[in-house]
Image (cartoon, rainbow, N blue to C red):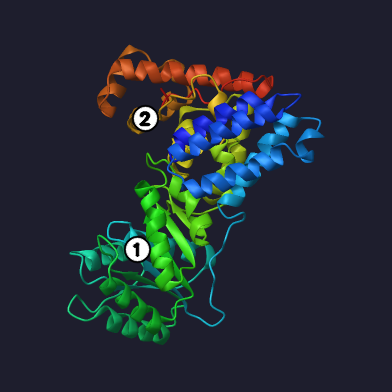
């Protein structure tokens, strides 16, 4: 997960100061020193770090903290607010044209993920704003770039305009814009070529494309894995093309996250979207306040709720809650629940959004095994309706049949049945008595 090491360091620092009845200047100095080291290790620009730490230090020893009833918590609030401000303060939305079409131009170095980001954003905007998109394939240099965009367009049922790789990108864009207007497309996304490094030829071509397309947004696509280099790339592109936003890809990877914390501060360009996975729906609007909360271990409940609302059937969810409360929860219900939760995205990412989830025993090093989820689904699907409703009837011969049908072993079937029984018992206690228990002890977590 993005920011993992930074998040761990900052949370450890915050934990030491959280419960303090008094916070001295020495405490603040020690805390800001640790924050400085954590940010530098996360590859945040050193000028950004210096300014950030200075701001925290000034506020943390000021009146708002010293006169507070809970100084420790007030310091954490200061850090959260400054971290939010560092990443842009509030969410910056897409600038839609008053007169259609809205034109989004994607630029960046080769391999940053421009083509897939263009397709993901076309899919996202069509779904959330009911637009009729057209994608223009203007990368004629990278082998298979046009084919890639056409394949993605086919998967998403979004048309792609192309004139092949023998016509100049500027002419492709000019004719693509004409087609968009003629066919009443109110959204145009232009995929352009990248280079391994910035050069005059690339910039000249992009400036010409910008001139003929008059984009409402010029999105720089950067790979979060490139760290500090992403900030340098953003600065160079911004100087020539006046960027309006950044799309940061691979923020779900093993990245130190420094680029996300530096880009806005250094270039003044807001991060508007972040790529959180390979799937077409794994592109999310960037919310600085929510990201700051996640980094500090406070969770991201709003994003979790939005994901749930977009993917989970409300009526089914209510029905499932009733079954849990009345303990009539069957293996069929469990199978359906797994499917609905899976639609929300990688389970590890969902758990990371839960406030204080990292403080549950065993949560820190817990891995969600997707193969185990497939195995569980196969086992349950190999059962008869009667077995799913009443697992107690599953004897030795039935277990053999289920194992054979699901391509698993009898031991795997036994394990699932025991875990399901334990989970029902735990849910009954968790929901009935209101006791604080770990609700994450599910059969696909280890």
Which quarter of the rendered picture does the C terminus lie within? top left
**Mark 1 or 2, closer to the camera:** 1
- Where in the figure is residue 46, as x and y percent of width and height? 48, 46
Q: In this rendering, is residue 21 above or below 210?
A: above
According to the picture, the residue beneath numbered tag 2 turns out to be 369
- Name the quadrant containing residue 218: bottom left
Question: Which residue appears at 45% of the width and 60% of the height?
Answer: 246
- Where in the figure is residue 87, as x and y percent of width and height? 55, 51
Crowd band around label 2 with a 10 angstrom C-alpha radius: few (<14), some (14–19), many (20+):
some
Q: Secondary structure at mark 1?
A: loop
Badge 1 vs badge 2, beta-carbon distance below 8 Å: no
Q: Earlier in the sequence, mark 1 or mark 2?
A: 1
Q: CA distance from mark 1 to mark 2?
A: 34 Å
- Where in the figure is residue 28, as x and y percent of width and height? 65, 31
- Where in the figure is residue 229, as x and y percent of width and height? 36, 52
Question: Which residue appears at 58% of the width and 37% of the height?
Answer: 299
Q: Secondary structure at mark 2?
A: loop
Q: In this rendering, is residue 318 above or below 226?
A: above
Name the foreground residue: 288 vs 116. Answer: 288
Crowd band around label 1 with a 10 angstrom C-alpha radius: few (<14), some (14–19), many (20+):
many
According to the picture, the residue beneath numbered tag 1 turns out to be 108
């Amino acid at each position: 997960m993005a920011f993992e090491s930074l998040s761990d360091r900052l949370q450890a620092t915050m934990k030491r100061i959280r419960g303090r009845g008094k916070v001295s200047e020495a405490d603040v100095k020690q805390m800001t020193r640790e924050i400085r080291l954590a940010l530098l290790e996360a590859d945040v620009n050193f000028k950004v770090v210096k300014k950030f730490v200075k701001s925290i230090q000034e506020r943390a020893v000021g009146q708002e903290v010293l006169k507070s009833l809970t100084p420790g918590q007030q310091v954490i609030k200061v850090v959260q607010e400054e971290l939010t401000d560092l990443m842009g303060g509030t969410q910056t939305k897409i600038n839609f044209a008053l007169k259609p079409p809205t034109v989004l131009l994607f630029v960046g170095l080769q391999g940053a993920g421009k083509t897939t980001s263009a397709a993901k954003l076309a899919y996202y905007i069509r779904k959330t704003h009911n637009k009729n998109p057209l994608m223009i394939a203007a990368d004629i240099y990278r082998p298979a770039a046009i084919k890639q965009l056409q394949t993605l367009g086919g998967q998403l049922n979004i048309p792609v305009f192309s004139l092949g790789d023998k016509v100049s990108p500027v002419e492709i864009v000019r004719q693509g814009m004409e087609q968009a207007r003629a066919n009443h497309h109110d959204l145009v996304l232009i995929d352009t070529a990248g280079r391994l490094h910035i050069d005059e030829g690339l910039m000249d071509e992009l400036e010409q494309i910008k001139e003929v397309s008059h984009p409402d947004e010029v999105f720089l696509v950067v790979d979060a894995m490139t760290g500090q280099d992403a900030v340098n790339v953003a600065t160079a592109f911004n100087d020539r093309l006046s960027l309006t936003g950044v799309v940061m890809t691979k923020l779900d990877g093993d990245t130190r996250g420094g680029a996300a914390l530096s880009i806005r501060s250094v270039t003044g360009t807001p991060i508007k979207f972040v790529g959180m996975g390979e799937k077409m729906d794994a592109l999310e609007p960037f919310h600085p306040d929510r990201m700051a909360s996640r980094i500090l271990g406070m969770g991201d409940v709003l994003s979790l709720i939005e994901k749930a609302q977009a993917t989970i059937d409300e009526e089914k969810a209510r029905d499932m809650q009733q079954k849990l409360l009345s303990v009539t929860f069957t293996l069929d219900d469990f199978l359906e629940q797994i499917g609905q939760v899976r639609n929300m995205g990688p389970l590890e990412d969902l758990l990371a959004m839960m406030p204080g989830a990292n403080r549950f025993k065993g949560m820190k090093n817990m891995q969600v095994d997707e193969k185990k989820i497939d195995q569980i689904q196969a086992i349950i699907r190999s059962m008869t309706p009667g077995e799913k409703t009443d697992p107690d009837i599953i004897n030795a011969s039935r277990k053999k049949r289920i194992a054979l049908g699901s391509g698993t072993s009898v031991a795997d079937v036994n394990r699932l049945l025991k875990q399901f029984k334990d989970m029902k018992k735990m849910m009954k206690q968790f929901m009935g008595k209101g006791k604080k228990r770990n609700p994450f002890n599910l059969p696909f977590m280890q």
